Image (cartoon, coloured by chain):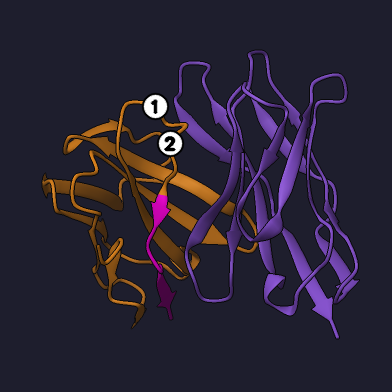
Amino acid sequence: AQSVTQLDSHVSVSEGTPVLLRCNYSSSYSPSLFWYVQHPNKGLQLLLKYTSAATLVKGINGFEAEFKKSETSFHLTKPSAHMSDAAEYFCVVWDSGGYNKLIFGAGTRLAVHP
Amino acid sequence: DAGVIQSPRHEVTEMGQEVTLRCKPISGHDYLFWYRQTMMRGLELLIYFNNNVPIDDSGMPEDRFSAKMPNASFSTLKIQPSEPRDSAVYFCASTRGLALVNEQFFGPGTRLTVL
């Protein structure tokens, strides 16, 4: 079975400093991986996705993630945090092992301080 | 497009009452998903439909929960009878195409409180 582990439940950064949200996955297949963002009282929105093309994936709002098979990681980064980035972020894997559904990580809450 | 529409946005009810949550997917999308989000369990897939047909309902917690999709533009999630542990935010999402690797578009959610 496929799974994702988000290594930090909360991350706090200052505005203008880099953001790193960590995600490790477990998969028996070549995985498809996603990052979704959820702003307060809103639904989830896709930030970016990896589907076995380029290992460095660029998403919206300046975010990017790098797929590292050797480390089974798919960490999300942004060079400079903005106040509007404060939200909850979910690392997601597509379970292709016969169940055909998205498996969500527990989420990382990002706080951005002035 | 207006995006995925859910109603009501907030629902407060008493234990034992029937609750019906509604969802209108994005026009042209052929997959529809119902999720539940709680602090304890995070985001869980309850059921999903393809072309109005339920494909996987293994996430439905128990017989008190039921979901229908009578046509391509409408789905309901019903809880009868409701219990306090059903309190959560329920999301509906839709997508187009065969692959579940496609982006899922989420509605704003329904916050359910069962007293």
| Residue underneath mark 1 | B99
Instruction: Determine if marks 2 and 1 fall on one subunit.
Output: yes
Q: Quadrant of the N terminus of chain A?
A: top right
| Residue underneath mark 2 | B102
* Magenta residues, start to end: B105-115
Labelled disc at residue B113: none
Q: State left or right for residue A41 relative to residue B18.
A: right
Label 1: how many Cα within 10 Å (few below 14, some 14–19, many 20+): few
Tell me the amino acid under the disc marked 1.
Ala
Q: Is residue B14 magenta?
A: no
State the image coordinates of residue B74 (x, y, percent, origin top left). 15, 55
Circle 2/circle 1 CB separation < 8 Å: yes
Q: Chain of mark 1?
A: B
Q: Residue at x 87, y 25 (%)?
A: A71
- Secondary structure of the residue carrying tag 1 is loop
State the image coordinates of residue B91 (x, y, percent, origin top left). 41, 59
The chain whose colour is orange is: B
The tint of chain A in the picture is purple
Q: State left or right for residue A101 relative to residue A67.
A: left
